[in-house]
Image (spheres, rainbow, N blue to C red):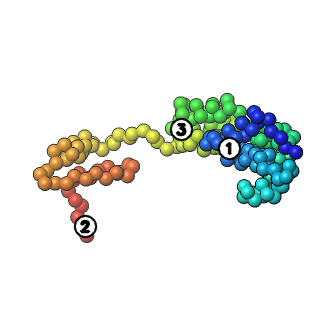
Amino acid sequence: MLVLSGSERQVLQGWVRASSTPQALSLRSRIVLACVEAEVDGLPRSASAVARELGITTQTVSKWRARFLRHRLDGMGDAPRPGRARTVGDEQVAAVVKATLETKPKDATHWSTRSMAAKTGLSQSAVLRVRRAFGLQPHLAETFKLSTDPFFIDKVHDVVGLYLDPPERALVLCADEKSQNHAWTGPSPSRP
């Protein structure tokens, strides 16, 4: 028979009510509370009755009831999952992120996955996983590129002048330009 202490009941009810509680933990708490609170003729409710009430399987009810009996509140969390242990440590991850953001290799504009792997001693795929996890894309330029057009300053004056002093009864519109394309300020090209 499943019996709760007052503090266990408070903890379980708190997990059910708190909006920050993970859904899995909340459901497990509701299972245990439903098993305890609804006795029929002094006998515990059947797993199937609790399962119907909560809209889950009887196997799930039986699993969490037994786990609570065995481990009490400590058994309500997720058990460690099987699988290979993590091989890349936090220090290595931090080193990849820091090097990607703060340094550049000699004779290159950014670290490739291959060059970063050689620098850090990690595999190329480990470097790629770190970059994906942190959204790092060092191959994409994030700085403003100044035009090499000899008439760039004149064109800037023309475009800014339209905004500051538009012609009378004119509508000035702005469209986001494609990267590496410059605003055309000369006469319209003729169409064939």
Mark 2 and mark 3 in contact (Cβ < 8 Å)? no
Circle 3 crowding by C-alpha within 10 Å: few under 14, some 14–19, many from 20: many
The residue wearing badge 3 is 110
Cα distance between the residues tagged 1 and 3: 49 Å
Residue kind at label 1, given as amino acid type = Val
- Rendered location of residue 170, percent (x, y): 16, 54
Going 35% across and 40% down the picture, which residue do you hit? 146
Going 71% across and 33% down the picture, which residue do you hit? 89
- Residue 81: image quadrant is top right
The residue wearing badge 2 is 191
Going 16% across and 44% down the picture, which residue do you hit? 165
Cα distance between the residues tagged 2 and 1: 70 Å
Front tag of 2 and 1: 1
Work out whether residue 147 or residue 92 is closer to the camera in this orientation and state it.
92
Work out whether residue 96 or residue 103 is closer to the camera in this orientation and state it.
96
- Rendered location of residue 61, percent (x, y): 80, 52
Task: Name the quadrant of the N terminus.
Answer: top right
Q: Which mark is residue 16?
A: 1
Q: Residue furthest left?
A: 168
Q: Which mark is residue 71?
A: none
Q: Earlier in the sequence, mark 2 or mark 1?
A: 1
